[in-house]
Image (spheres, rainbow, N blue to C red):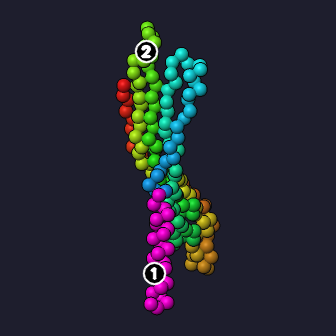
Amino acid sequence: MGISTRAGLASVMACMATAAAVAPAAAAPAVPVVVPLGALNTVLPFEAPTLSTGMPLPVPGVPDGPRYVKGNLMPKNMVPAVPIESAVPDTHLGAPLPDPLSSRVLGTPALISPDSALHVVTPGADLGAPLSQPRAALFGLPAVTLPKAGLTAPAVQGAPAATASF
């Protein structure tokens, strides 16, 4: 096996190992969290509600970096917008409903919000140079112009939903 073949095989193996290391992080977009509300039992005349949710793990994507455009002195996307993938975690809220006339529980109403994907893009900035291109009328010197500045709008895309049950 030649040196170039071994080097190519080593680079393929390194890429596969990196992909395998990243896959578990992408498969688990949230860390489960159970909110301890048991201490409310001493204060409330009925059983405390239960709440379980998750802490989202945002995964930043590859920003659309600066691009040089013909005719401009400064590149486009000076501060690039960064895409971030995350999830709204699975949330369960249940509260026992006591019967006011007796000591029994009528049921446990629940509010359930399933996890859903969330895509966010941070704002970016674009800045133009305060000089124009060299002009023939000015003997090849640039003219002074007002600098142009702009912001790209942030974006949030998601479809959260919730259901109530008794």
Marks 1/2: CA–CA distance: 68 Å
Q: Which residues are magenta?
A: 1-24
- Prevailing secondary structure of the magenta residues: helix
Do callouts 1 and 2 mark residues in contact (Cβ within 8 Å)?
A: no
Query: Could you say which quadrant of the image residue 112 lies in?
Result: top left
Q: Nearer the viewer, residue 138 or 72?
A: 72
State the residue lying farthest toward the top.
Answer: 101
Q: Is residue 113 above or below residue 131?
A: above
Say what secondary structure mark 1 lies in. Answer: helix
The answer to whether residue 64 is magenta is no
Query: Looking at the image, can residue 39 be seen?
Result: yes
* Amino acid on which disc 1 is placed: Leu
Q: Nearer the viewer, residue 16 or 119?
A: 16
Q: Which mark is residue 104?
A: 2
Q: Is residue 44 left or right of residue 101?
A: right
Residue under the point 52% across and 41% down: 33
Q: Which residue is mark 1?
A: 9
Q: Is residue 10 left or right of residue 106?
A: right
